[in-house]
Image (cartoon, grey):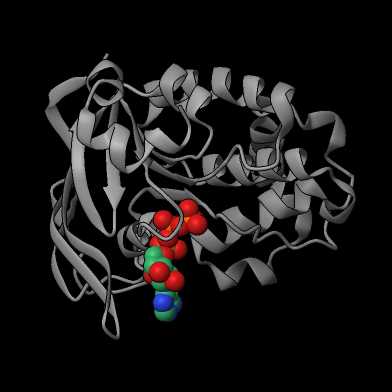
Amino acid sequence: MVDQNSVVLQIRNLNKSFGALKATDNVSLDLYSGEIHALIGPNGAGKSTLIKQICGEYEQDSGEIHFMGENMKGLGVADRAQKGLGRTFQISSLALEFSALRNVMLAVQAKSGSSFRFFKPVMKDQELLEGARTMLDRVGLLDRQHVPAAELSHGERRQLEIAIALALKPKAFLLDEPMAGMGPEGSRNLTGFLNTLKVEAPILLVEHDMDAVFALADRISVLVYGQVVATGTVEEIRNNPLVREAYLGEEA
Ligand SMILES: Nc1ncnc2c1ncn2[C@@H]1O[C@H](COP(=O)(O)OP(=O)(O)OP(=O)(O)O)[C@@H](O)[C@H]1O
Ligand SMILES: [Mg+2]
């Protein structure tokens, strides 16, 4: 259930310029507990820039990001991940030479940030191994655990990235085009999966696949030239003339 009283992620008046280009322009939005909040908009609208600002890859020029009530200012990517901001990337960030299982384990190790692990015998990491397998199972990749990421299909890699995000036990997910290149069946499977995932942690979902967005989103925000031009339910967004003109018109 979407709980409007429970704001997990609060973004206020966020800005980011690259030279003269305002990539995000006074963006404010909230992510509530239990919701999938889709972020849509044309190419170059600033969606990935916003995700990168939230996860700490880009520092905002101005504005505020509060996550679980805490101001994220000055915190880097690792700190924010540690605090529970889970993300996937528009461009794959897997270690291609390693197995699916290894990729998940690496991510968990990186999160724990414990170099002391190098001094431990590998078998001590049974818990890590079991945890990683559980995540692969959840995204439907367990039977592919020993396959190098390089040999996974594009869709399977996207699934693997979600397993990695999951392994970090996030309190919110930032997913940048998880359906990209997945094909109809992969998209359908992922759609079902995200619907169960949002119960654990709300999802800010950047996605171009409008069928998926309309099927999944509890709310949608539309970004055009770095600005949020509308936020609302699926029905409200579908019927918003400004949105139809600025964005949906090209798809209708
Ligand atoms: N590191 C950067 N340096 C300079 N300009 C950038 C940088 N990152 C993004 N931009 C520019 O900022 C604008 C927003 O880009 P962004 O990648 O956030 O768009 P997007 O909404 O994710 O687009 P797409 O749907 O194609 O992924 C674009 O004009 C882009 O060229
Ligand atoms: Mg993008």
Question: For the image shown, how many numbered marks are present on the structure?
Answer: 0
| Quarter containing the N terminus | top left
Q: Position of residue 31 (x, y in %)?
A: 24, 37
Left or right of 126? Residue 219 is left
Name the residue rendered at 72%, 35% in the picture. 133
Name the residue rendered at 76%, 53% in the picture. 102
Image position of 128 with respect to 231: above or below: below
Q: Position of residue 209 (x, y in %)?
A: 53, 33
Q: Quadrant of residue 126?
A: top right
Pick the front one: 227 or 101: 227
Q: Position of residue 146 (x, y in %)?
A: 88, 44
Left or right of 159? Residue 59 is left
Name the residue rendered at 42%, 61% in the picture. 44
Left or right of 86? Residue 20 is left
Is residue 74 in view? yes
Image position of 209 with respect to 215: above or below: below
Pick the front one: 33 or 39: 39
| Quarter containing the C terminus | top left
Q: Quadrant of residue 191?
A: top right
Is residue 77 in view? no
In the image, farthest residue toward the bottom: 19
Q: Position of residue 28 (x, y in %)?
A: 14, 50
Name the residue rendered at 70%, 34% in the picture. 136
